[in-house]
């Protein structure tokens, strides 16, 4: 086996193992211990984060910052991966902001000159625009770590002008229109709620001894259909900000007729998936159960659709629209 091939296979081997000794590698590769020591030294110089321990039970281990072995990409794959990462540059806050910038820099600089020229020619001709936001999101990393590690967080959360501490167990985080959201099990409300990450003034791991729930099978893709954890969670009826606990008496059924343009406007809203019904001619309707606390939101949303929507019910929603429009007219009369 050539030295270059041995180094490549050695890199993949040590990256896969948690701990190893020189003798184990020497036996596996059929070379002397001295050769393995020289190879490990070269890997260290190439950036593989190796750590050695002396003593009878010593050996080597790769630190947590493991590196991936070289991967061969086609030109089209390389361009696609570059722009997939390049698209995130408009987000001021990301869970791995510095790491993503470092990876993109390495990826770009190790490409061949002709591929870099092709990317440079595309940079100003393709973009993924998001709204500019003044909001700050300093806790994305701990929210994501808590979601993957099944941990409970104590957050200082502000909603509707009130600030209070909440104990939550995050399910994940997602970005929409320049804002970050965190669906999480709220121990105060006894169900999954969606929290605006910029409204969190603090997020730390809980040390009270509260036992986390088993939410390993709950994720962003199925959270809307999720109905119970040990019989205590309730199905999330919508995803407009943070939800208040509701029962049948706290719910109303809405019915809003939509033109084709109204349907397209609703399709852009994440919460619409459970309420929006479309027809073959492009028209549609918003129909389904919502909490009474969401009536003002839907009144404002219907007003924003102007003539593309017609509210059929309930009467209380029509009353909300009339009140809001009256307040608006009073400002300009």
Image (cartoon, helix red, strand yellow):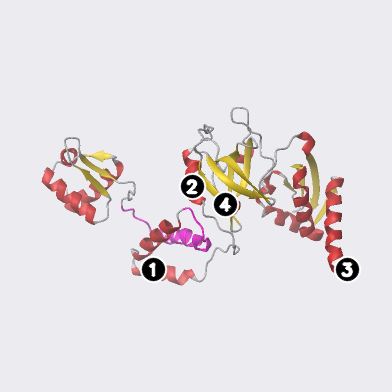
Sequence-earlier tag: 2 or 1: 1
Residue 299, position as x, y percentages in the image: 79, 53
Residue 68, position as x, y percentages in the image: 33, 50
Residue occupied by mark 1: 116
Residue occupied by mark 4: 201
Sequence-earlier tag: 1 or 3: 1
Tag of residue 142: 2
Residue 167, position as x, y percentages in the image: 57, 40
> Any magenta on residue 85?
yes
Mark 4, secondary structure of its residue: strand
Q: How many marks?
A: 4
* Image point (27%, 55%), residue name: 47
**Which span is picked out in magenta?**
70-95
Task: Report, in whole angstroms, how far the alpha carbon at label 2 lies from the one at label 1.
Answer: 35 Å
Tell me whether circle 2 and circle 3 mark residues in contact (CB < 8 Å): no
Of badges 2 and 4, nearer the viewer stands 4
């Amino acid at each position: 086996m050539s030295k270059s091939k041995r180094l490549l296979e050695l890199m993949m081997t040590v990256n896969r193992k948690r701990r190893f000794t020189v003798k184990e590698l020497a036996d596996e590769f059929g070379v002397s211990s001295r050769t393995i020591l020289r190879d490990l030294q070269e890997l260290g110089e190439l950036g593989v984060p190796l750590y050695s321990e002396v003593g009878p039970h010593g050996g080597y281990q790769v630190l947590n910052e493991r590196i991936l072995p070289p991967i061969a990409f086609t030109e089209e794959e390389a361009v696609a991966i570059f722009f997939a990462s390049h698209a995130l540059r408009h987000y001021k806050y990301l869970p791995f902001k510095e790491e993503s910038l470092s990876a993109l820099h390495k990826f770009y600089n190790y490409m061949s000159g002709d591929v870099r020229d092709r990317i440079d020619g595309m940079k100003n001709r393709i973009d993924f625009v998001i709204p500019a936001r003044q909001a700050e999101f300093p806790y994305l990393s701990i929210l994501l770590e808590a979601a993957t590690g099944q941990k409970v967080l104590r957050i200082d959360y502000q909603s509707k002008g009130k600030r209070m501490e909440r104990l939550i167990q995050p399910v994940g985080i997602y970005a929409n229109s320049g804002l970050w959201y965190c669906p999480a099990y709220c121990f105060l409300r006894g169900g999954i709620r969606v929290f605006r990450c910029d409204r969190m003034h603090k997020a730390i791991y809980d040390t009270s001894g509260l036992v986390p729930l088993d939410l390993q099978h709950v994720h962003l893709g199925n959270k809307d259909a999720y109905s119970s954890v040990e019989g205590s969670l309730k199905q999330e009826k919508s995803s407009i900000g943070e939800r208040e606990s509701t029962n049948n008496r706290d719910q109303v059924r809405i019915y809003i007729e939509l033109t084709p343009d109204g349907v397209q406007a609703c399709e852009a809203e994440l919460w619409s998936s459970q309420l929006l019904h479309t027809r073959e001619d492009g028209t549609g309707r918003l129909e389904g159960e919502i909490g009474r606390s969401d009536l003002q939101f839907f009144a404002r949303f219907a007003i924003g659709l102007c003539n593309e929507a017609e509210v059929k019910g309930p009467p209380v929603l029509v009353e909300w629209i009339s009140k809001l429009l009256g307040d608006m007219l009073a400002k300009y009369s």
